[in-house]
Amino acid sequence: MAEATLQRTESTPDIDRLRDIATRLRVDIIEMLAESQSGHPGGSLSAVEIVTALYFGGFLRYDAKRPEWEDRDRFILSKGHGVPVQYAALAEAGFIPHDELMTLRKINSRLQGHPVLGTCPGIEASTGSLGQGLSIGLGMALAANMDGKDTRVIVLMGDGECQEGQVWEAAMAAGFHRPDNFIAIVDYNKYQLDGPTAEILDVSPLGGKFTAMDWQVREIDGHDLKQVVSALQWAVEQTAPACIIANTVKGKGVSFMENNNKWHGVAPSEEEAARALTELRATARESAQTDGAAQKEAGR
Amino acid sequence: MKDLYPGFTIGKATRDAFGETLKQLGAEHENIVVLDADLAKSTKTADFGEAYPDRFKNVGIQEANMVGMAGGFASSGKVTFIASFASFVVGKGFDQLKMAVAYPKLNVKVAGSHGGISLGEDGVSQMSTEDFALMCSLPGFVVCCPCDENQMRAATRAAYDHDGPVYLRLGRQKAPIVYDAPIKDFAFSKATRLREGTDVTIIANGMMTAAALVACDRLAGEGISVRVVDMPTMKPLDDDEVQAAGEETGAIVCAEEHFIHGGLGARVAQAAARLAPVPMQFVGVDDVYAESGDPEALFRKYGLTSDDIINATRRVLEKRGAGRA
């Protein structure tokens, strides 16, 4: 389990450590979904690096032992179907016991199929009906500005979600009201339930749309942790709403799920999960070896 | 519309009473934030906005975003009042009212103004004859339609005091005074028995409460003893008062400025069916859209007058039969 971050950190986090955590979250996602036999692997896996950097890169101030701590920063997963990645992060951060992940989507579980405020500690808004998180986050950001607090509010959306009109109501309002603590990230994995976003209702140019609404915008590779960290470092410095367009791969990290939209909302079978876990463990081993070599290198 | 309420003093519109009270509450409580969607002059939140500009945002014509933002403000500890026309905030913000307010049980107070058809000339796009039904469908919401300025003042204060979501329906037109003094003991869960009676109970809210009193007095002249219950709050419903109406008077007429489906009448019928089933009749807009017109003419054409209540009362008494046990 990673340490709780009572304070944000200014220094650049250890990327190797983040990479290890990212792999652990992917393992958790596959195990949870295989256990529940229900849920959305594709959009959970595409957001892993983003969520990892946020929770474990020093960008969010939280205390897992006091989830309702008044001075915490707020992270809203507006693309609520990706919640397995958030539950995995909340377990990693100590908000919930790791074992509890296996209750995902089961009766009487705190881990509802989409995020629900007031059930699972660390969840800040009820989402899953797409397009709503940016508005809720804007309310939080403005409330913090009103009270002179330095609370950060970060909202993660999907690219398909950006087809919802409410996203642009909120984007226009944020560009106008200009809270200085408000960050939107788009997990631009290029797919929605029925197929490629570009074929169903192309949202591009996504950055241009946010720019036109007076946001500061950066576009990155959403799986390159260095880029994710650097973009977040840039975003928190902005005094106007900042948007990070993170180009991602749906299903990232599991070869047979990558860019295969069959895995939008279907859980892996036992056999498929085993294959996925074998791949992820191999990735973890490779990464450990690389880390070891790098440490040797550094030690010389 | 005053001809519809002979003998009544016509007071302020409930939206005016709401706006005044909201401004007073703003002076008393630092934690109130108010959002409006470009109808602040109509919903009367503009008074609060002028007095407390730092705690007021006109979000523009964005009802869905306004409801979402309200959820964010409320979950940050603000008692958040939002206002628009009932038709827009409820209709365009419904999924947001579910997800960002009702489901997380947040402290958002929704004011839907220009409710019903009495807004008149602007026509159906601005009218709301669905809001009771929609708002009553959301678990945890208090749903209330006060009948006059004094009751609206009390209800607005009660909305602030209540820990959880509240829907208040506001009216555009000056409303007949039913309560001629400030109400000290207002509670959402309590209806008010305005007239005692033994033959039938009329249960009404909003503009229909005064019409029910007019009907009561005229029926008294025919020897019919009518109980009149003012029931502003449809959720939570005053079950005891419904049960008493059924058991003690044996017939119920409901009257509301709303579709006859899904609002006060439906809520009362469900309670009566469970607690004291008796014949019932329903006065309201009967499953059709109204139209542009003078408010009084609209009330006459779409069946929202004391005459309509009297006719419904006769029907319910006929149905029950003269020889009630």
Image (spheres, rainbow, N blue to C red):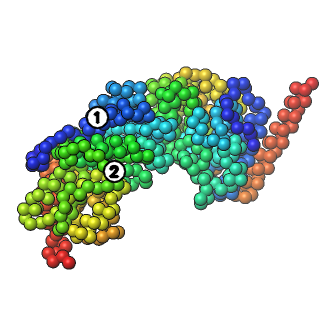
Q: Quick check: A89 above or below B49?
A: below
Label at residue B20: 1
Query: Percent position (x, y) of residue A205?
Result: 53, 30
In the rendered image, the vertical position of residue A288 relative to residue A29, given as above or below: above
Where residue B187 is drawn, which disc sits there?
2
Report whether residue B184 is seen: yes
Q: Residues within 10 Å of mark 1 (few under 14, many from 20)?
A: some
- The x, y position of residue B284, in whole percent, is 22, 56
Q: Residue at x 29, y 63 (%)?
A: B242
Kindly tell me whether residue B292 is visible in this rendering.
no
Instruction: Please state which of residues B205 and A40 is positioned toward the viewer in this rendering.
Output: B205
Quarter of the figure that contains the N terminus of chain B = top left
User: Could you confirm whether marks 2 and 1 are on the same chain?
Assistant: yes
Q: Give the mark count.
A: 2
Q: Which amino acid, by three-letter code, is at mark 1?
A: Glu
Q: Residue at x 23, y 57 (%)?
A: B193
User: Which quadrant holds residue B200?
Assistant: bottom left
**Callout 1: SS:** helix
Q: Residue B163: give x, y in percent of width and height.
A: 44, 46
Q: Alpha-carbon distance for marks 2 and 1?
A: 20 Å
Q: Residue at x 80, y 46 (%)?
A: A281
* Closer to viewer: mark 2 or mark 1: 2
Q: Amino acid at mark 2?
A: Ala
SS class of the residue under badge 2? loop
Q: Going from the N terminus, do you reach mark 2 or mark 1 first?
A: 1
